[in-house]
Amino acid sequence: GQQVMQIPQYQHVQEGEDFTTYCNSSTTLSNIQWYKQRPGGHPVFLIQLVKSGEVKKQKRLTFQFGEAKKNSSLHITATQTTDVGTYFCAGYKAAGNKLTFGGGTRVLVKP
Amino acid sequence: DAGVIQSPRHEVTEMGQEVTLRCKPISGHDYLFWYRQTMMRGLELLIYFNNNVPIDDSGMPEDRFSAKMPNASFSTLKIQPSEPRDSAVYFCASSLRQGDSYNSPLHFGNGTRLTVT
């Protein structure tokens, strides 16, 4: 079945530094979504990427969808304590209605 | 917009007891999803409904789990009998359309933290 893998599993970041988390799918995706879950909270939708090679920005967050639509990345610049949480990518298989979540990258920020 | 409402927030029960989790989706959303989250297995899709009809229940662990959606504004996930390995956070989520190239975002409830002793 479809698998979505995320690396790294944990990311310790010094406040002010940049980091990137990566998402890889075993199958081609029709689109990919990113969610953020704060400690003790629930996943909250951040963004959706649909087109091959698409890049979208939300303030300090940059999301990219790979050319082959099998991988994606999230890059955060100038990390802040408010960025603490777990970032999930989630992909839809082509022509599918099931959203498969990756294992998430848990981000810890050192002040 | 009240968002997706789940109850209870916390449930502690003894092994063998029946557990019922409840969910009220966002009004107008056609899709409802039940997910389970654990440290070991992450977020797993258990079952999803479209217009109150179960579409895919392949993620339901075993016959002890059942889910219903009697109307557009209410769904339940039942575990009978419960076992310690069922301890997890159970999330309900709802969304608008799902299609070939665009899938509406999922709106998650606050979850039910289930502990089976």
Image: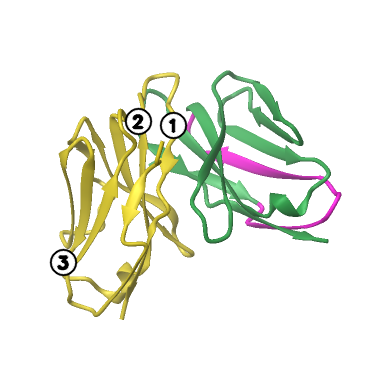
Chain colours: A green, B yellow
On the rendered structure, is B62 left or right of A93? Answer: left
Identify the amino acid type marked 3: Gln
Q: Tell me, for residue B80, which label it has, or none.
A: 3
Identify the amino acid type marked 2: Asn
Q: Quadrant of the N terminus of chain A?
A: top left
Return the x and y of residue A33 as percentages of the image width and height.
53, 34
Query: What's the residue at 18%, 35% (across, down)?
Result: B52
Residue in the foreground of this view, choosing between B55 and A28: B55
**Element on which disc 2 rests:** loop
Q: Which residue is mark 1?
A: A92
Is A12 contained in the magenta span? yes
Q: Tell me, for residue A97, which label it has, or none.
A: 2
Residue in the foreground of this view, choosing between B49 and B40: B49
The magenta stretch spans which residues? Answer: A8-28
In the image, is residue B82 above or below residue B36?
Answer: below
**Element on which disc 3 rests:** loop
Q: Are marks 1 and 2 in contact (CB under 8 Å)?
A: yes
User: Mark 1 vs mark 2: which is more N-terminal?
Assistant: 1
